[in-house]
Amino acid sequence: MNFTFGIISGKERPGDIDKIIDSIEQIKNLTKNRYEILIIGGNQTPYRLNTKMIEFEDHPRGMWITKQKNIIAKEAQFENIVFLHDYITFDSDWYWGFQLFGFHTTFDVCMTPMLNVDGTRYRDWVWLNSLSEGPPRWVRYSDNSLTRQMYISGAYWIAKKQFMLDNPLDENRMWGESEDVEWSFRCRDTWNYKLNPYSIVKLLKYKDTHCVGPR
């Protein structure tokens, strides 16, 4: 199972790219012919294994992360694309977790546990039926019954290349304009959305979840 890691960054919002790449390079059993790293935006040009920089200018109206993610989908050479913002790092057993999950498990979109810097869950496996019903609610990792009412935070997810090409993000929306909510609501009636509970990622900075209910 091969992966394209697409890191979303920006000249005015540089993340710790080296720490992210370090974490990818330290993933056990993820050999050099099984992955590539694409970095779009930002002002850092790391000369690292299997890493390519894609130049990008933000929209005058704001951070154009929808366009960045759609470019990643087009440029990716592998079927499995990991979309991540520049504050997500990977546990060293992340690839082993996909082996345990099952390389032949079918999905269009996949989520794994995201942990905040304090070790609590970030916005990973969550329910959001409509914006009028309030903030997202936590869903237990063992519950796979609500995927038609779930929402994917734009911070991190895994998807098949063809699914992303068929279902691009809305490039009329910038960061902070509910671009992830719009995409989730548009795709979730048709997606095959799965949780892989074994492959953990961690945030490099604390972020409020704005989620409610038991974790």
Image: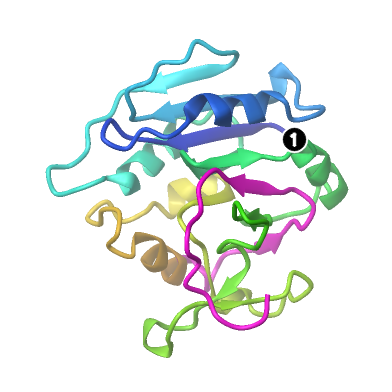
Check disc 1 and give the amino acid type.
Met
| Residue 33 in the image, given as x and y percentages of width and height | 70, 18
**Element type at mark 1:** loop
Q: Residue at x 42, y 69 (%)?
A: 186
Q: Residue at x 47, y 15 (%)?
A: 46
**Main structural element of the magenta stretch: helix, strand or loop?**
loop
In the image, the segment drawn in magenta is 187-215
- Name which quarter of the figure residue 8 lies in: top left
Location of residue 101 with respect to 125 vertically, above or below:
above
**Pointer 1 residue:** 1
Location of residue 110 with respect to 53 vertically, above or below:
below
Location of residue 16 with respect to 83 vertically, above or below:
above
Location of residue 163 with respect to 25 vertically, above or below:
below
- Residue 63 magenta: no
| Residue 202 in the image, given as x and y percentages of width and height | 63, 47
* Residue nearer the viewer, 110 or 24: 24
| Residue 166 in the image, given as x and y percentages of width and height | 45, 51
Q: Residue at x 35, y 39 (%)?
A: 68
The N terminus lies in which quarter of the figure?
top right
- On screen, residue 62 versus residue 132, left or right, reads left
- Name which quarter of the figure residue 19 lies in: top right
Is residue 103 something one can see in this rendering?
no
- On screen, residue 47 versus residue 197, left or right, reads left
The C terminus lies in which quarter of the figure?
bottom right
Q: Say how many tags the image has.
A: 1
